[in-house]
Image: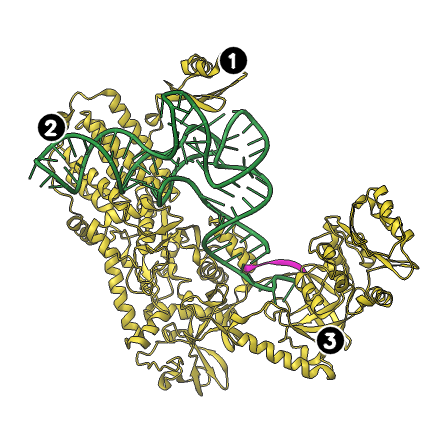
RNA sequence: GCCGAAGUGGCGGAACUGGCAGACGCGCGCGACUCAAAAUCGCGUUCCUUCGGGAGUGUGGGUUCGACUCCCACCUUCGGCACCA
């Protein structure tokens, strides 16, 4: 054996990735191998990876994202697709400007220097990017069209300017979109500083025009996770818009998802900023209301950390009228009602809304239950001395459970016995006392009469009666507050579920499933409201008070107002001679010669808009600029568009789900409606990869000092090894902390492929073992199937492991003397083809060394033959009572009866049966036999 | 609080549609080669064991001939949203 090995394992030259890789990269580039050209004869595939930001150095995480996508794109190309894999840079943004302030480098210089370095690093990866399509968002030839898109939106009422309370980052000195404010403590997505609210005149895009279409994912193959995140972000809720009138006949519009609880509205709440506050406030409350508003708005202006969930509010002195039951209810203002959601006003139903319940309890406002408890629990607390002797015995006799403490009874009434209990209570209650029945009933049984807690009037009456009889309850301001004082009652006083309507006039008794629609219908017939849909998403705030971005092409003229810069004057060039002062002011604001221009319409004195656009605006259409980055008759060449669009596969991180990935869909739909693009969706298939973290498990960043430099890894192991390791060591969808522990395995594998290929290159076939030849062929075809299927699914780790298995098999075949045979050569050749998308350089080098025609990357993907992949023999697993007792090798096509027979004949099985007769024998064809005794 | 995802050896991670848990690697152990080491190659490697076997995929139950996989409850971690009416 050892001798055999020595004769076949020739000494081969060393594998030197440092020499091989740059050589092939240069040749591929010189040959234009990766140019994507329109070719109507081949099916196209537009493969897009998320636009990298020009932060400077790439870290290993970029490699994880980019090299796996490259592998997948290369695979598609070998499968026969005409693939375009473009690359470019997201080059505007805050870090460039911050570097300018900190280190006195011009943002432009900083950015383009970074791009040069990133380009060099990216090229060392050996990816199939078409660099002739490179697009840089800060190039005037790019942002000319970003501005052009803005103008189309502006002219079609999709862009507008309005005064609005917006999030402001005090460190970066700019406004942020709502999506860019993250976490529990509402910090800036970029720098982590807590944001504050500012009231500013800002530019918005009408993304809310497209909400319903954005919720429709039926035309795209996107991960459930992203679809769910976007759905939640858009936050559609159905309900009703209801109009209440104040006593002065001013309408108060509210949105509610629970019109069925309308009879339980016992007060209303306006947001402190609500325009009606001023009007409704009564003279005697004016001072306290104003003070509250001042406090509430100052609170939101301060850092929001101290945001206490404790409810605050103040009565306005005004009343509104419930349109259905005519009740006059007080109008309060409170900070828990937000001006930015719904109509900025609510009807408060404390009986069935947690927040209203808390508020009502705190301020002693009445609470009415109007939806029956779906759980049927009913309770009654019978105070000692409130009923006749023998009450407890009567309960026992009826079978109503209770516990007794110091003479008082805590009764839990079974639903079926509620009527019996009511009768008992009525018969036994003593004068000057009462019994409550709470839960599915809201009865107060007094000796002379029974009250139901069903109207505000009764609520008052009950409280009065009780307070008359019992001094201890005189402190309470509402019936509910009185009941809340008994811990025994707490779990039946409140619920927010759907259920049968009660205490709701003519609608009482309406079943849960009809309650919403019936109430809405009545509102509509009374002209007091209608069905309505409300959304959480707000319009996209796109203006930024910073320099390094695309200037908004608008001129503000005293005479003409907001005037669009004529399209032929685009781009509005960012002036190079800006000055950064530590004031935090945008340098554009302080640049007089740039800022002051004549009005394009009246030629009078006017000022340029000094805000620049959110960089998400640039990245909303970069996939279109890739089509023709230097085209100057429009944002893209229509011929290129018609061939390549839409994007077939898009890869990137899930962290963009509610930002870039919503914006770009909106952008596309808006452009479609303006006749600029075609189709409903820009990207058909989306796949999210995970993130490579620093070795410490934290996100890689310069400030944490945990950045892994890919240059260093490439120098040490070669680009192919780094690529293959990133694919092998992590689940693509998960990522994980960087560790170089496993990379040795990949390095060994690649070296093994190298020596195996070159060491057998000139081998002459011997009389090999024919079963081994068959085994090799079988493994080869199984591997082709596995590698293809897993590449389709972006499961790179199992792709590599399958290739390692194949390599091991080829190794065994060599040791068995198969080298030089046709099947052996075919196996090596196929192995190289299968490796080509993953480790492009070594595959090309070995392909050339074996004398095959250049380039391996233009070859066809190996063909899978199911027949050749088939196993002839299988291991039949024999179980007794579900436990594996024997394994018998049998022919693969074995029939059930034969399998049963063989299994029952096994000696070990007979031993385990211990003479007992099998009760049942289950045969799973081609797998196992389970004998049950 | 609400919504979602995930918990498998010392480690990274496999496992089709309910059918041999731990593929492929790392690490570790033993051996070969070597004066020696590295590299390379071979063998072994879930745990316990009286060597018959037993236990085992976060925990506890359930369904099934059979469960990492399906159902119920719970625990932990991560992600999203959060006074959203």
Q: Position of residue A827 (x, y in %)?
A: 24, 32
Quick one: label 1, few (<14), some, or many (20+) residues within 10 Å? few
Tell whether B9 sits left or right of A428: left
Range shown magenta: A234-239
Quadrant housing residue A781: top left
Q: Nearer the viewer, mark 2 or mark 1?
A: 1
Label 3 sits on residue: A250
Report the residue marked by disc 2.
A7
* Residue A475 found in image quarter: bottom right
Contact? badges 2 and 3 (CB < 8 Å) = no
| Residue A88 seen anywhere in this rendered image of the structure | yes
Q: Chain of mark 1?
A: A
Q: CA distance from mark 3 to mark 1?
A: 89 Å
| Chain letter for the yellow colouring in the rendering | A
The furthest residue to the bottom: A605
Residue A510 seen anywhere in this rendered image of the structure: no
Q: Residues within 10 Å of mark 3 (few under 14, many from 20)?
A: some
Q: Which is nearer the eye, A230 or A860? A: A230
Q: Colour in which chain B is shown?
A: green
SS for callout 3: loop
First of labels 3, 1 by sequence position? 3
Q: Quadrant of the N terminus of chain A?
A: top left
- Magenta stretch: residue A50 in it? no
Q: What chain is tagged by disc 2? A: A
Vertical position of residue B36 compared to residue A406: above or below: above
Residue A393 placement, left or right of A719: right
- Residue A96 lies left or right of residue A391; in this view the side is left
Which labelled disc corresponds to residue A509? none
> A783 and A529: which one is in front?
A783
Q: Residue at x 50, y 82 (%)?
A: A561
- Residue A237 included in the magenta stretch of the image: yes
The part of the image, by quadrant, that contains residue A885 is top left
């Amino acid at each position: 054996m050892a001798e055999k090995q020595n004769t076949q394992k020739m000494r081969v030259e060393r594998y030197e990735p440092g020499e091989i890789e740059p050589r092939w990269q240069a040749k591929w580039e010189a040959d234009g191998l990766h140019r994507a050209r329109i070719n109507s004869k081949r099916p196209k595939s537009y493969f897009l990876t998320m636009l990298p930001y020009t932060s400077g150095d790439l870290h290993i995480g970029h490699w994880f994202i980019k090299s796996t996508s490259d592998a997948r794109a290369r695979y598609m190309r070998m499968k026969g697709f005409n693939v375009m894999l473009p690359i470019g840079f997201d080059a505007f943004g805050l870090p460039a400007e911050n570097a300018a302030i900190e280190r006195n480098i011009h943002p432009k210089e900083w950015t383009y220097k970074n791009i040069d370095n990133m380009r060099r690093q990216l090229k060392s990866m050996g990816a199939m990017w078409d660099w002739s399509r490179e697009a840089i968002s800060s190039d005037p030839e790019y942002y000319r069209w970003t501005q052009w898109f803005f103008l189309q939106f502006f002219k079609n009422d999709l862009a507008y300017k309005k005064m609005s309370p917006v999030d402001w980052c005090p460190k970066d000195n700019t406004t942020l979109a709502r999506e860019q404010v993250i976490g529990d403590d509402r910090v800036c997505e970029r720098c982590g500083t807590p944001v504050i609210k500012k009231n500013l005149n800002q530019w918005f895009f009408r993304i809310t025009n497209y909400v319903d279409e954005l919720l429709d994912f039926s035309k795209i193959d996107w991960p459930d996770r992203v679809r769910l995140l976007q759905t939640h972000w858009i936050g559609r809720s159905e309900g009703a818009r209801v109009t209440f009138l104040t006593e002065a006949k001013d309408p108060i519009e509210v949105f509610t998802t629970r019109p069925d609880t309308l009879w339980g509205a016992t007060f209303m709440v306006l947001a402190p900023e609500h325009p009606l506050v001023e009007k409704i406030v009564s003279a005697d409350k004016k001072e306290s209301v104003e003070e509250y508003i001042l406090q509430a708005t100052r609170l939101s202006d301060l850092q929001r950390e101290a945001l206490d969930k404790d409810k605050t509010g103040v009565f306005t002195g005004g009343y509104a009228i419930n349109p259905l039951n005519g009740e006059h209810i007080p109008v309060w203002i409170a900070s828990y009602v937000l001006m930015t959601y719904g109509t900025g006003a609510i009807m408060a139903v404390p009986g069935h809304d947690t927040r209203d319940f808390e508020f009502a309890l705190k301020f002693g406002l009445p609470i009415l239950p109007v939806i029956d408890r779906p759980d049927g629990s009913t309770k009654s607390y019978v105070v000692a001395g409130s009923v006749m002797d023998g009450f407890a015995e009567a309960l026992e006799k009826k079978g109503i459970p209770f516990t007794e403490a110091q003479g008082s009874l805590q009764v839990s009434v079974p639903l079926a016995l509620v009527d019996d209990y009511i009768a008992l209570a009525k018969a036994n209650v003593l004068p000057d006392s009462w019994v409550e029945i709470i839960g599915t009933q809201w009865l107060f049984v007094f000796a002379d009469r029974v009250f139901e807690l069903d109207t505000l009037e009764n609520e008052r009456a009950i409280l009065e009666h009780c307070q008359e009889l019992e001094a201890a309850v005189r402190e309470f301001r509402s019936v509910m507050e009185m009941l809340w004082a008994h811990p025994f009652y707490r779990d039946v006083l409140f619920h927010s579920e759907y259920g049968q309507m009660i205490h709701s006039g003519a609608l009482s008794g309406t079943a849960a499933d009809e309650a919403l629609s019936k109430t809405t219908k009545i509102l509509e017939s009374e002209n007091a409201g209608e069905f309505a849909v409300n959304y959480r998403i707000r319009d996209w705030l796109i203006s930024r008070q910073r320099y390094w971005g695309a200037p908004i092409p608008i001129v503000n003229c005293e005479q003409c107002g907001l005037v669009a810069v004529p399209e032929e004057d685009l781009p509005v060039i960012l002036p190079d001679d800006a000055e950064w002062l530590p004031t935090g002011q945008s340098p554009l604001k302080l640049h007089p010669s740039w800022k002051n221009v004549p009005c394009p319409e009246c030629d009078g004195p006017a000022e340029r808009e000094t805000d620049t656009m959110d960089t998400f605006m640039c990245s909303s259409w970069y996939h279109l600029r890739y089509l023709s980055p230097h085209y100057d008759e429009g944002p893209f060449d229509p011929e290129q568009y018609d061939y390549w669009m839409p994007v077939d596969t898009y890869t990137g991180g899930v962290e963009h789900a509610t930002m870039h990935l919503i914006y770009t869909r909106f952008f596309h739909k808006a452009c479609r409606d303006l006749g600029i693009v075609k189709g409903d969706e820009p990207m058909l298939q989306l796949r999210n990869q995970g993130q490579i973290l620093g070795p410490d498990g934290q996100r890689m960043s310069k400030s944490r000092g945990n950045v892994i430099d890919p240059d260093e890894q490439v120098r040490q192991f070669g680009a192919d090894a780094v690529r293959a390791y990133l694919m092998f060591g992590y689940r693509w969808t998960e990522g994980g902390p960087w560790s170089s522990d496993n990379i040795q395995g990949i390095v060994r594998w690649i070296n093994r492929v190298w020596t195996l290929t070159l060491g057998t290159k000139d081998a002459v076939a011997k009389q090999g073992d024919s079963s081994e030849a068959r085994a090799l062929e079988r493994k080869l075809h199984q591997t082709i199937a596995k590698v293809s299927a897993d590449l389709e699914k972006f499961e790179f780790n199992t792709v590599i492991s399958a290739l390692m298995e194949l390599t091991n098999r080829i190794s065994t075949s060599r040791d068995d003397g198969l080298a030089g045979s046709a099947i052996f050569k075919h196996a090596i050749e196929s192995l190289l083809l299968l490796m080509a998308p993953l480790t492009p350089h070594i595959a090309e080098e070995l392909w050339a060394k074996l004398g095959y025609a250049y380039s391996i990357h233009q070859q066809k993907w190996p063909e899978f033959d199911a027949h050749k992949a088939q196993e002839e023999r299988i291991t039949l697993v024999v179980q007794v009572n579900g436990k594996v007792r024997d394994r018998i090798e049998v022919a693969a096509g074995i029939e059930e009866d034969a399998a049963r027979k063989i299994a029952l004949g096994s000696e070990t099985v007979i031993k385990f049966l211990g003479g007992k007769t099998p009760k049942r024998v289950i045969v799973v064809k081609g797998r196992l036999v389970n004998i049950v005794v």
